[in-house]
Image (cartoon, rainbow, N blue to C red):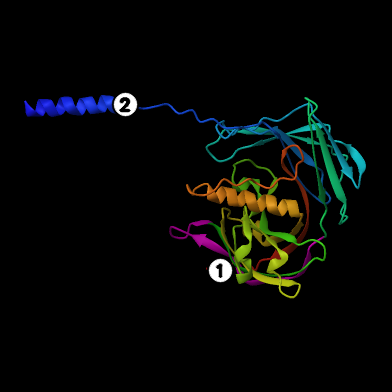
Amino acid sequence: MKNSKKYICFLSVLILFFSCQKKVVFDIDYKEQPVLNCLFSADSTVDVFLTTSVSPTDITYFEAIENADIYLYRNNKMLGMLNEMKETSYTIDLYSAEQIKKSYTNKNIKIRDVAGDVYKIVAILPNMDTCEAITQMPEKPILQSLELIDCSLEKNTVLGNMITGYGISGNIKVNIRKNENFKYYGIKVSYDANITEHTLEETDTIYKTYLPLEIKSPGFQITYLKGNGYIFSDSCFINDELEFIISVENTLRTNDPNVYNKLFVEVSCISEDYYYYEKEMIEQFTSQSDAFSNIKNVHSNIKNGLGIFACYTTLVDTLYLPEVQKY
């Protein structure tokens, strides 16, 4: 009898608990805005991605805005209209379906390698709303020296004498001199890979693969990792120069070491807007796993919209690796 009373009491409390629940509507004050993204370099064409922003409660699929009129200017002189629609397929990861990115371009417009050129973009949307932005072409970076330190290409084995590939291991010493008018930089290290490294197709297609880096220098405590490279400001420089060590280590999935006997070191000068956009984008990604972090707005220089319009110049130097070590 006592157990029966306890059961009835428990059931009553449970019913009361669920009957007191209240549905809370999470209302976000959200206004849709155009998003314009364009990063370009000297001696290249311009690709402009134009989409609409999405609410934080919506799926993160960005649909391209088509039938917009986009004009590009240099030093207040119109270079032309970006009137060609270019489609690029991509996948986020191995488990994602293939998606198509659409961009505006004009193959007849080439970006010249002149520091100080001011570029302006104006996008007129189908609803007649307008967004625009400006950016300034930086100077070429001043790469004073580049040196391999104990860097080699070695065979990797697992079972017996079966070769699974080759590995790069070692350090690269880099010396950069400060530019007078532009103070933001980037660095990456890559090698050229044949597409047959990943597929069974017989083709001569070559694509660039970037190596994961680690920079061993106390002055780089305030820099930021971008993909497999770094961006940094001239606050790292001492007496107008910056010398640091890059540690590289990576396993290549190939049995032909002759294709991968050189590395390409890319040193860039980037515009100020580019630096703060990448810096704050990285900070936003890294803070997503922290439940107590504040929501951070990513830097944008688009007037009447969101996104980034920025440019950079790059100097590429080649380092040749020693011969493959024999075992």
For badge 2, the amino acid type reads Phe
* Numbered tag placed on residue 283 in the rendering: none
* Prevailing SS of the magenta stretch: strand
Do callouts 1 and 2 mark residues in contact (Cβ within 8 Å)?
Answer: no
Quadrant assignment for the N terminus: top left
Q: Is residue 291 left or right of residue 80?
A: left
* Numbered tag placed on residue 18 in the rendering: 2
Q: Residue at x 7, y 28 (%)?
A: 2
For badge 1, the amino acid type reads Lys
- In this view, 124 is above or below 93: above
CA separation, marks 1 and 2?
A: 72 Å
**Residue 242 image point, x, y percent:** 71, 71
Residue range of the region highlighted in magenta in the rendering: 140-164
Judged by depth in the image, the label closer to the viewer, 1 or 2, is: 2
Q: Is residue 99 left or right of residue 315?
A: left
Residue 158 covered by magenta stretch: yes
Q: Earlier in the sequence, mark 1 or mark 2?
A: 2
- In this view, 98 is above or below 247: above
- In this view, 181 is above or below 48: below
**Residue 182 image point, x, y percent:** 79, 61
Q: Please state which of residues 162 and 281 is positioned toward the viewer in this rendering.
A: 281
- In this view, 148 is above or below 134: below
Report the residue marked by disc 1: 326
Residue 146 covered by magenta stretch: yes
Q: Please state which of residues 30 and 42 is positioned toward the viewer in this rendering.
A: 30
Q: Residue at x 79, y 63 (%)?
A: 141
Is residue 26 visible in this depiction of the protein? yes
Rendered image quadrant of residue 23: top left
